[in-house]
Amino acid sequence: MTTFAELGVPAEIVKVLAADGKSEAFPIQTDTLPATLDGGDVLGRGRTGSGKTLAFSIPLVAGLAELDVDRVPGAPTGLILAPTRELATQIATAVEPLAKAVGLTVTTIFGGVKQARQEQALGRGVDIVVACPGRLEDLMQQRIVRLDNVEITVIDEADHMADLGFLPGVTRILAATPADGQRMLFSATLDRGVDKLAKRFLDNPTMHSVDEATSPVEAMTHHVFEIEHADKNAMVAELASGTGRRILFTRTKHQARKLAKKLTSDGIPAVDLHGNLSQPQRDRNLKAFGEGGVRVLVATDVAARGVHVDAIELVVHVDPPAEHKAYLHRSGRTARAGNAGDVVTLCLPDQRRDVAGLLGKAAIKVKPVRVRPSSAEVDALVGARAERVEPTPEPARPAGQSRQGAGGGRGRGGANGARRRSGGPRDGRGAQSSRGSGQRGSAQGGSGQRSSGQRSSGQGASSQRGSGQARGGQSRGQQNTQSRGQQRGGGRVRHQAARTA
């Protein structure tokens, strides 16, 4: 395999990667780094877990360091757009040690948290911003951040942006960046408008398609367990009882919360991850899962992308997803970076046809097996069982105080209860709302939104308690820019000159 040093990665960054046990590049890194380190635009396609985060983080940091950019308050020079706050946080975690090695700073911008800290970070001056589209546009509207200083832009998981309806917001953001800057776009697929985005904003990009969206992962073993309704709860408990980390996917937030609580009460510590949780609650649960105190994470599809925890040995589709791309992204939480992992899909009698169609579209070939919780196939897969843990009693709450983060679409309080009123996506933007007296919306997507007030980002939004009046959203101005063909020349000459100086 090719080493990062052989690919021309700066020595300071190579040293940081080596300290983290990374000295040899994965295929997507080998194929894209020569072009991106040279300042070229790249359109990369690779499956989840392929190593694409480093594929764009390395040239972003190396390029800004080589350009010797100035740090200007409210005007970052590096920008990474991500569809969810979980993914944004994961990306920032990967970028920060690389940036620190060359004297650059990183911050995140997304909804579901108070804006003040983000304002403070931008006010001090920051080099690289990892952002979700909605909150970033809010801060642009308020003139807290401007993007005319951005030298390098990355759009990660553009296909997920499209699925969530975020591409109009992404388009406006890219239009606010200099047309002569370097741009890298990574996406598992090029449908749903992603191809148009690439055509408009990428300048003669190098195309790298290391893996098809449905490429099977050799180290991932798939199982389909056909079970009866009466056995489902016992089967889930069996699969959750092993000693290694595992993620259990459910279709709804209510089911995720209920299952995590049930497993914990049965002596299998579990935490949930879904859209009804506030950002601090999400961070706390992910930390408990990632640091080993809790081995089971029960999640909705909010965790299917962007959540990377090492050594997840098993993914269980408690409820099969509705479409094959969700299956692949859920399953991609295991067998990452060359590690082995297993994926189990629980299939009830009335789900057999749907599951067969799902796996066919995902190009997964597996023979279903009829099992009971006590079957040898289940025992062999689970392996050694972890010791049961006596659950800690929940502290009593004062009378009248509601539970925060409750699932099932009835959560209240703080950022936990934010919900969207309308049914469809809103140009990639969430909504930041004040709690109106007696107003409720239906829970949809991410954490959902409650009213059409000030916009936020990613899949969720923060909410504020008000006196029944929602804060009016600010109008969005049209960002005007000259065509890429008119501006590319001067800026690209400056960019390449800095690299050859």
Image: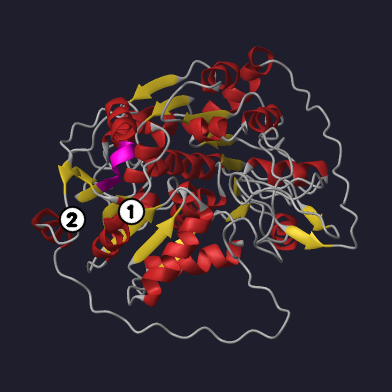
Compared across the picture, whether 276 is left or right of 102 comes to: right
- Marks 1 and 2, the one that precedes in the sequence: 1
Q: Which residue is mark 2?
A: 372
Task: Kindly identify the residue that appears in the image at 33 percent across and 73 percent down.
Answer: 268
- Where residue 203 sits, quadrant-wise, is top right
Measure the C-alpha gap from mark 1 to mark 2: 45 Å
Residue 468, compared with residue 243, is above or below; it is: above
Magenta stretch, residue numbers? 344-351
Amino acid type, label 1: Leu
Closer to the camera, 401 or 184? 401
Q: Name the quadrant of the N terminus.
A: top left
- Residue 163 screen position, x and y as percent: 54, 32
- Residue 79 screen position, x and y as percent: 59, 41
Q: Which residue is mark 1?
A: 17
- Residue 322 screen position, x and y as percent: 43, 36
Q: Is residue 339 visible?
A: no
Q: Is residue 481 visible?
A: yes
Closer to the camera, 322 or 116? 322
Task: Tell me the SS state at disc 1.
Answer: helix
Q: Callout 2 environment at 10 Å: few (<14), some (14 to 19), or many (20+)?
A: some
Task: Kindly identify the residue that appears in the image at 46 percent across and 51 percent down.
Answer: 300
Residue 200, compared with residue 12, is above or below; it is: above
Amino acid type, label 2: Arg
